[in-house]
Image (cartoon, rainbow, N blue to C red):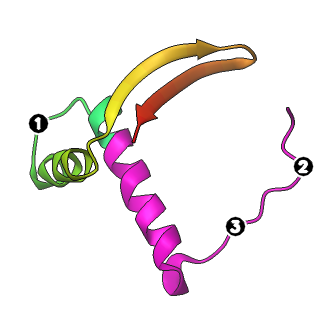
């Protein structure tokens, strides 16, 4: 499957985009941060826990890295 178009939108007036950004940021923090833990890690853990996200990795044909999360 190929992506036809990609259009950016401002999160300023879109609570759903802000929410998606918060969730994506929390997942990124949990999977990729290697430094000392601080308040950002605590917030990421709270978001992941509140949504009961279960993170895992798997392989998908045609994609080099994939993160799966079950909602």
Point out the image quarter for the C terminus.
Answer: top left
Question: Residues under labels 2 and 3: Cα distance?
Answer: 14 Å
> Where are the magenta residues, as a range?
1-28
The x and y percentages for residue 57 are 44, 18
Residue identifier under label 3: 8
Q: Secondary structure at mark 1?
A: loop
Mark positioned earlier in the residue sequence (1 or 3): 3
Q: Secondary structure at mark 3?
A: loop
State the residue at coordinates (53%, 80%): 14
* Within-10-Å neighbours for mark 1: few <14, some 14–19, many 20+: few
State the residue at coordinates (64%, 17%): 64
Residue identifier under label 2: 4
Point out the image quarter for the N terminus.
Answer: top right
Residue identifier under label 1: 36
Task: State the count of labels.
Answer: 3
Comparing 37 with 25, the one in front is 25
Residue at the bottom extreme? 13
The x and y percentages for residue 54 are 31, 31
Q: Is residue 5 left or right of residue 67?
A: right
State the residue at coordinates (48%, 27%): 67
| Mark drawn on residue 13 | none
Decide: is 8 above or below 56: below
Q: Could you tell me if the residues under marks 2 and 1 are in contact, i.e. CB atoms within 8 Å?
A: no
Q: Secondary structure at mark 2?
A: loop
Question: Residues under labels 1 and 3: Cα distance?
Answer: 32 Å
Q: Is residue 1 left or right of residue 17?
A: right
Question: Residues under labels 2 and 1: Cα distance?
Answer: 40 Å
The x and y percentages for residue 32 are 34, 31
């Amino acid at each position: 499957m190929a992506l036809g178009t990609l259009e950016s939108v401002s999160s300023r007036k879109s609570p759903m985009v802000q929410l998606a950004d918060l969730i994506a940021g929390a997942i990124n923090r949990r999977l990729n941060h290697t430094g000392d833990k601080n308040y950002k890690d605590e917030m990421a853990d709270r978001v992941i826990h509140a949504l009961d996200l279960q993170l895992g990795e798997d392989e998908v044909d045609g994609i080099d890295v994939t993160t799966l999360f079950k909602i």
